[in-house]
Image: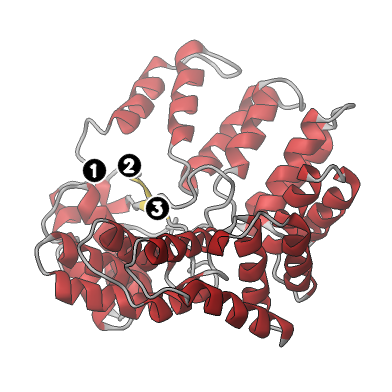
């Protein structure tokens, strides 16, 4: 099971689970990705059987516990929450976030909230999402100082968490928090950014770009703070600068920031650069493929299927066999839609020998119309 950084514009906050069937269910491994990888991608699990995952979990591997919990949940086993609890009890942020969410849904809101807050303190963007939703649903009220801290903790792992600053502005307008909090927060962010805090600099730029505190949109000020963040090594700021300068009509400056981030392995920038290489005139499919391979190596869950499409469309030599290879790669790292594309290729004989049996097997995976695990595997999925 490989944890991959979710990158790209399309719904980065979704969780995805990809069940994998092999010759026997004991050789199966469940695969999923999540948007908050905390400090780095977790160890690879794609080659591990359920038995091997269980052995790791029994030895205290909290990542294996979470993987087993997701596998059990996919197979609609009641035992899945036990794995999340075991991981949470050992202080795993993802385990705490998942188990906290389960508790919150099952009528144990105070206990669930406490776990979610602990996970948010450790930088979990998933926990921050669920805390935010509970607050937006009116089930809890969150202390604004803690909420500000949680956003800043999550930003290095998921820069889209910056959109949560808008919640603080809205809560202040509705009287849910004291007036003047957001203005004081802006002052704190600016002071921290001036002192060299790249996360605070990114947050200050974001708030000015998206009118937090009710100010007019100020792209020049946003660019100023984003530059501070980018120059300190916060690569998502390069992506925002690319978008800002494009909006301001200075595409050359924007592309320079984009290329800087791509050279340093920023996934979003690599994907955007690949798209630019393909669609700008004259198109350069070879360069697009090179950038997509780098994005895949950096942990993108989107790059492999995009690369497969270049082969399917004939823009790169290799055709169907190469497309199949990259679609299988995409499925391996958690891009669930890759199974559907593979199924269609085998069904139609597009670039590969027609194989209706293989196509049916793949469509079955897409439809989830078969059990994921046999009894032996299911017994191992019970904590």
On the image, numbered disc 2 is attached to which residue?
21
Q: What is the C-alpha distance between the residues marked 2 and 1?
A: 7 Å
Point out residue 46 in the picture as x, y percentages from the top left corner.
44, 56
Point out residue 54 in the picture as x, y percentages from the top left corner.
27, 68
The label shown at residue 10 is none
- Work out whether residue 57 or residue 143 is closer to the camera in this orientation and state it: 143
Q: Residue at x 38, y 51 (%)?
A: 15
**Quadrant of the image occupied by residue 120:** bottom left
Query: Mark 3 and mark 1 in contact (Cβ < 8 Å)?
Result: no
Q: Is residue 323 above or below residue 214?
A: above
- Inspect this view and state whether residue 248 appears: yes
Q: What is the C-alpha distance between the residues marked 1 and 3?
A: 14 Å
Point out residue 229 in the picture as x, y percentages from the top left corner.
72, 71
On the image, numbered disc 1 is attached to which residue?
372
Mark positioned earlier in the residue sequence (2 or 1): 2
Mark positioned earlier in the residue sequence (2 or 3): 2
Q: Residue at x 66, y 78 (%)?
A: 190
In the image, which is nearer the foreground, mark 2 or mark 3?
3
Most extreme residue toward the bottom, as rendered? Answer: 195
Type of colouring = secondary structure
On the image, numbered disc 3 is attached to which residue?
32
**Quadrant of the image occupied by residue 133:** bottom left
Query: Mark 1 and mark 2 in contact (Cβ < 8 Å)?
Result: yes
Q: What is the C-alpha distance between the residues marked 2 and 3?
A: 14 Å
Per the image, label 2 sits on a secondary structure element best described as: loop
Instruction: Using residue 175 as the reference point, say whether residue 310 is left or right of it.
Output: right
**Quadrant of the image occupied by residue 204:** bottom right
């Amino acid at each position: 099971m490989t944890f991959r950084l979710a990158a790209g514009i399309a719904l980065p906050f979704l969780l995805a689970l990809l069940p994998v069937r092999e010759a026997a269910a004991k050789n199966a491994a469940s695969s999923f990705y999540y948007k908050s990888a905390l400090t780095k991608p977790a160890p690879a699990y794609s080659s591990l059987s359920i038995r091997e995952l269980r052995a790791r979990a029994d030895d205290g591997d909290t990542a294996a516990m979470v993987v087993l919990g997701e596998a059990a949940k996919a197979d609609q086993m009641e035992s899945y929450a036990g794995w999340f609890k075991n991981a949470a009890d050992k202080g795993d942020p993802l385990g705490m976030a998942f188990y906290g969410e389960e508790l919150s849904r099952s009528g144990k809101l105070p206990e669930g909230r406490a776990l979610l807050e602990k996970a948010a303190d450790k930088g979990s963007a998933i926990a921050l999402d669920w805390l935010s939703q509970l607050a937006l649903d009116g089930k809890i009220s969150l202390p604004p100082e803690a909420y500000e801290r949680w956003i800043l903790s999550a930003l290095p792992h998921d820069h889209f968490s910056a959109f949560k600053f808008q919640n603080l502005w809205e809560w202040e307008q509705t009287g849910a928090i004291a007036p003047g909090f957001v203005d004081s927060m802006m002052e704190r962010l600016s002071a921290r950014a001036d002192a060299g805090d790249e996360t605070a600099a990114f947050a200050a730029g974001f708030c000015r770009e998206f009118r937090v505190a009710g100010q007019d949109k100020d792209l020049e000020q946003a660019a100023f703070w984003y530059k501070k963040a980018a120059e300190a090594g916060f690569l998502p700021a390069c992506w925002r600068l690319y978008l800002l300068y494009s909006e301001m009509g200075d595409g050359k400056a924007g592309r320079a920031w984009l290329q800087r981030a791509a050279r340093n392995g920023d996934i979003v920038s690599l994907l955007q650069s690949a798209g630019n290489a393909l669609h700008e005139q004259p198109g350069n499919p070879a360069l697009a493929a090179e950038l997509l391979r780098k994005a895949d190596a950096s942990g993108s869950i989107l790059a492999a299927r995009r690369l497969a499409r270049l082969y399917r469309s004939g823009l790169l030599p290799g055709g169907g066999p190469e497309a199949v290879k990259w679609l299988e790669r995409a499925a391996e790292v958690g891009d669930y839609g890759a199974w559907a594309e593979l199924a269609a290729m085998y069904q139609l004989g597009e670039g590969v020998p027609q194989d209706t049996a293989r196509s049916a097997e793949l469509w079955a995976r897409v439809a989830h119309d078969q059990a994921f695990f046999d009894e032996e595997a299911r017994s191992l999925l019970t904590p």
